[in-house]
Image: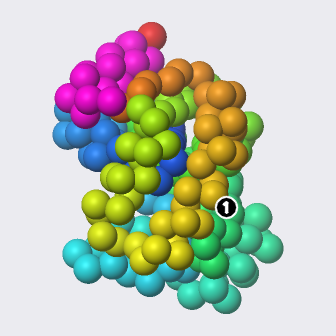
Amino acid sequence: MASGPPGKLIVISAPSGAGKTTIAREILKRNPSCAFSVSATTRPMRAGEVDGRDYFFLSREEFERRVHAGEFVEWEEIFGNLYGTLRSEIDRALLAGRHLLFDVDVKGGLSIKRHYPHALLIFIEPPSLEVLRQRLHNRHTEDLATLARRMERVAMEMETGKAFDRHCVNDDLGRAVEEVQGLVQEYLTT
């Protein structure tokens, strides 16, 4: 049981390539009281990733078993892979008084808010669709078909992001990090 105040939840979401993961990592560095919420996925591990640190890498069968057992606060299939947030991980952190930072898609963010109404949802917007497309291309992590599928999701993500508590346009990474840091500090100290 926590000896101090309960933990808080911060969700950062955006279309792929808008900078959410880069911003989330910087926010974690600046806020030692925050821990990264590790999601579960069925996608293959990428070079440099570590099971339990970047994701809980599960087989499709194990993931689906946990879905049917009600163990996920949110989950979704994206581009043929399943992603989700385990309820046990959130509850364990909150009971220990730890703050969790989430780097999830927009639907997952809204689902977390439904289960934990006091969560802060921050949506990172790209400055334009062309800038977003160029950022995705420059990552060299997707082939052209995957890049096209990611771009097809952008309209839905931008529309869904309107329901988030706060918004930040990532037109300049340093400025965007400072803006999100200010939102996080305000939330954690109130």
User: Would you say 123 lies left or right of 115 here?
Assistant: left
Residue 38, x across and y down, in percent: 43, 59
**Visible residue check, residue 92:** no
In the image shown, does 121 or 147 lie closer to the viewer? 147
Residue 184, x across and y down, in percent: 38, 23
Residue 28, x across and y down, in percent: 27, 40
Q: Residue at x 67, y 61 (%)?
A: 75
Bounds of the magenta segment: 171-189
Prevailing secondary structure class for the magenta stretch in the rendered image: helix
Q: Residue at x 36, y 53 (%)?
A: 134
Amino acid type indicated by mark 1: Trp
Q: 10 Å neighbourhood of mark 1: few (<14), some, or many (≥20)?
A: many
Residue placed under numbered mark 1 in the picture: 75
User: Would you say 102 lies left or right of 79 here?
Assistant: left
Residue 9, x across and y down, in percent: 50, 35
Q: Quadrant of the C terminus?
A: top left
**Visible residue check, residue 148:** yes
**Relative to residue 115, is residue 103 depicted above or below?**
below
User: Would you say 124 lies left or right of 108 here?
Assistant: left
